[in-house]
Image (cartoon, helix red, strand yellow):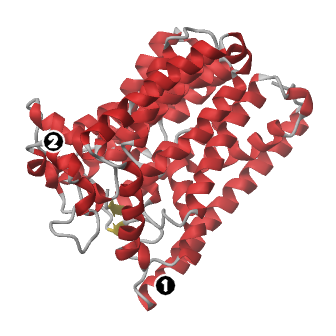
Amino acid sequence: MTTRTPRTDARGTRRDLYAAGAALLLVLTAALVGRHIEDTYGTLHVGAPPLYANWLPHVGPGTPAALAVAAAAVAYGPALAARLRWRALLATAWATATAWILSLALIDGWHRGIARRLTTKYEYLQVIDRFHDIPATLRDYTRHILIDAPDHWPAHTAGHPPAAPLTFVLLDRIGLGGGGWAGLWCVVTGATACVAVLVAVRALAGEDLARRAAPFLVLVPGAVWMGASADAWFAAVAAWAVALLALAVTGRAIGWALGSGLLFGLTCYLSYGLTLFALIGLAVLFLGRAGVRERPGALALLFCAGLAVVPAAFTLAGFDWWEAYRLLHTRYFQGAGGIRPYSYWVWANLACTVLVVGLATVAGLRRTAGHLLRPRERDGGAARLALLVAAALLALLVADLSGMSKAETERIWLPFALWLVPACAFLPRPRLWLVAQAATALLVNHLLLTGW
């Protein structure tokens, strides 16, 4: 990275603070304007705009643990990230992320924070019994998407391809039924997403930047919504799809392309919106273009072979992805999506994202733009990381402009948001920014009762 004078560093820090202040102003504006719209027209369908939550200051059994994890991550995170062996760092990052997610969820108690979240009327566990004959259910899946269809699916099942509910059906089949096991599955697998992002960043931009990003990926404020949210599971699958592709194109082992394709296919059958991960995948191919040029045929063959598996299996079982998405578009506007005003959510969604990624990431994104615009850094690790982060930001903005993500994006956009957090590797004084990250998560979880 470029050497900077103290004067330049001070100027950069001031600009970081300006960016963070602007982000805070965006959140405050979204809260005030949203409160006015909801009180006047009742069209937002959220209790604490811009978040799907209700104002309810509280503490819980997870409070001491969350404070302890935050304090330890701030105090020791940067030093451990710098000196641990790489594999030990990955294991420590996963364990700490799991503890952070779990402790935040337990602020609401075991029942409300973990066991009940995936059992509400909107969630996947409501449909477990309807999958007693999986092939027959898949053939009939699209007939129950519209809200006026007989026995229509609950909102989340209707809004996702069948791999999402099938995850919990299969857990039930192997004896891990009920909300508790489902919630723990999401916590434990969701925590691996930070490991996948670290693997990709190291492969594409270098180990130093990955190590600098590690404490921020662990202590991400989005952990508030990763506790017992199926979107944490989706985020992990998508993240590993990208990570394996990064390993394949940078010459670690070409066989990883097969696994990457398999996971990219699964990602598209977990959530329609995650097809936008193709933009991040394209960025990975661009960054690893030297490796791609060496063995383009083998890479393409392995990736496409893996990519075909999940779509082929569901198509042969009778599920039509394109027809389902067409019906989902109609269903979306039959419900709250047809009432919530686009003119508010198209910018208020970004305020939600600020709360997910934290002020440190906002400051890091400001620095990301600088690295993208410096020609002399074009082949450096910082510029490569900046391009990867920019691809994730582009995917998120496309999702925003689509109009199919009005509200609840603090949960829905978790898979994209995690790829913005490595921008924090560009920040000096990481401990101060980690304090801001931890404070954001702790304040949100203690002041609000989140809906997911």
| Front residue of 384 and 437 | 384
**In the displayed structure, would residue 252 be above or below residue 34?**
above
Is residue 82 visible to the viewer in this orientation of the structure? Answer: no
Question: Alpha-carbon distance for marks 2 and 1?
Answer: 43 Å
| Front residue of 142 and 218 | 142
Residue type of the residue flagged with mark 2? Ile
Query: Quick check: 211 left or right of 194?
Result: right
Circle 2 is placed at which residue position? Answer: 134
**In the displayed structure, would residue 24 be above or below residue 28?**
above
**In the displayed structure, would residue 285 be above or below residue 45?**
above
Circle 1 is placed at which residue position? Answer: 37
Element at label 2 = helix
| Front residue of 404 and 358 | 404
| Front residue of 234 and 218 | 234
Most extreme residue toward the bottom is: 40
Task: Give whichever of discs 2 and 1 has the lower sequence position.
Answer: 1
Q: Which mark is residue 171?
A: none
The image shows residue 419 at horizontal and vertical percentages of 57, 38
Total numbered circles: 2
Query: Quick check: 120 left or right of 390?
Result: left
Q: Given this view, does label 2 or label 1 mark the residue nearer the observer? A: 2
The image shows residue 57 at horizontal and vertical percentages of 33, 64
The answer to which image quadrant residue 338 occupies is bottom left
Query: Quick check: 290 left or right of 438?
Result: right
